[in-house]
Image (tube, grey):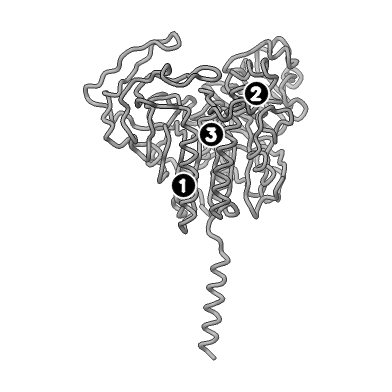
Amino acid sequence: MMSRCLLSLSCLAISGASLIAKQPNVLILYADDLGFGDLGCYNSKSKIPTPHLDQLAKEGMRFTDGHSSSGICTPSRYALLTGRHHWRDFHGIVNAFGGSVFKPERLTMPEMLKEKGFDTAVIGKWHLGWDWEVLKKPDAKPTEVTQWNRKKKQWGPEAFDWSKKIPDGPLAHGFDYYFGDTVINFPPYCWIENDKVVSPPDAIMDTSKFKKIKEGNWEFRPGPMIKGWDPYENIPVTTRKGVEYIKEKAKTDKPFFLFFAYPSPHAPIIPNDEFDGKSGAGPYGDFVHETDHSIGQLLKALKESGQAENTLVIFTADNGPEHYAYARDEKYDHWSSYPLRGLKRDIYEGGHHVPFIIKYPGVIKPGTLNESLVSQIDFMATIASVVGFELPKKNAAEDSHDLMPLLRGEVKSVRSTHIHNTSSGRYAIRDGDWVLVDTKSGYVSRRDKNWEKKHGYPEKENAEAKLFNLKEDIGQRNDLAARHPGKVKKMQALLKKIREQGHSAPRLAK
């Protein structure tokens, strides 16, 4: 009798254990220079077919008020992977052969997930720095070249010992695996796997050897390149690597975190030939369509490997579209930032107000629309909540808000403020429905008066700070600063407080 009871208890224990699912995988799909109005699920007037992302939105939660930390590449990636506003540490991008932006003590998302037993990988664009100085030969000297009417230093392939490991890259900050070309338009132009180049560069970058570019400029910085380098291969090759990684992880018992960072539709705008003419927005639209197609392959790999129902999928972009969007709107009548004002770099909404979709099977009700203010900075605290990680109070996620109550449909909002910034000394702050652009202009990249005239913007901007009510004026046409001076002062004080106190996360509030 006793043995049968023990056997029954043992069976119950085994049965109970089998009901406890392993931690969900985490897949972050990160586009580069993508507009809020480029996806069909955000803009019914979009001339770009994005069927896979539209389907992802139907299967998850589509946020209409999601933001990156910055209007440019490096800072937004840093904020996403740390849960900390970039402007607390720096403002600009990592330039060619630039060092890492991470301090050793700074907790990153992959480091957090490794502690919870995850395999971690980043495929595609890194743009957060490496220690290239270790590879430079003692007698290496750069040559001077002129590009864009500016003199620049150019390192040749002979300046580096390519057999050495490249320190302080992805593997030094929590990732088990890396594959990519670090930044598509920065040297070295070659594939990097983990912390070594796959094949050493043996030539100098020369865009005349590439196939013809399809829109805009190459924007390649001078430097070492491997002979035969073809930037058109970036998305096809990295997509294959991503599919392989996802399918391989299905064979293990460990959950995975994959940060898949696209080079697109960032310049150079180079859709592959099979995607030419697939959109009504020119080569850029075709490039967005190719990106969507790649995402479809990654999501298909999840499904075919039996992991789709146990994977948290996040799609968003680092910032708004590049200035080529002005010409695109004139030629194709497609405004990539629709219905917003501003583009990449700008602190008007179009610079940082981005597509933001989350799918979490069993948690999020499919097809949910959420109008709450959210930020990519919030991914750190959210994923910590998902995996049961207690964030330290020091050097960790100082500005991150846990979105899980939103994803479960328990609350209407988790944050009411957000600070937007691209360059030093120029900030905007969001507080509820209001946004204060606390500088002379929200434009950073460039202003196009023909575009403003077409879309009904006033000819003149006020010289001082500008105040908008986004609920009534999402396009930021009507500056209300003169009518609400008290509101301006109140928001300036709030901006000063958040900047000086060093944090904004609820868990750190006194």
User: Residue tagged by mark 2?
Assistant: 281
Q: Out of 72 and 25, give the one closest to the viewer.
A: 25
Q: Amino acid at mark 1?
A: Tyr
Q: Amino acid at mark 3?
A: His
Across and down, in percent, residue 401 comes to 60, 43
The answer to whether residue 496 is seen in the rendering is no
Across and down, in percent, residue 191 comes to 39, 33
The mark nearer the N terminus, 1 or 2, is: 1
Viewer-nearest of discs 3 and 2: 2
Q: CA distance from mark 3 to mark 2?
A: 34 Å
Q: Residue furthest top?
A: 149
| SS for callout 1 | helix
Quarter of image, res 198: top left
| SS for callout 2 | loop
User: Residue tagged by mark 1?
Assistant: 245
Q: CA distance from mark 1 to mark 2?
A: 33 Å
Mark 1 in CB contact with mark 3 (< 8 angstroms): no
Quarter of image, res 169: top left
- The tally of labels here is 3
Mark 3 in CB contact with mark 2 (< 8 angstroms): no
The answer to whether residue 388 is seen in the rendering is yes
**Label disc, if present, on residue 85 of the rendered structure:** 3
| Residue visible at 49% across and 19% down in the picture | 212
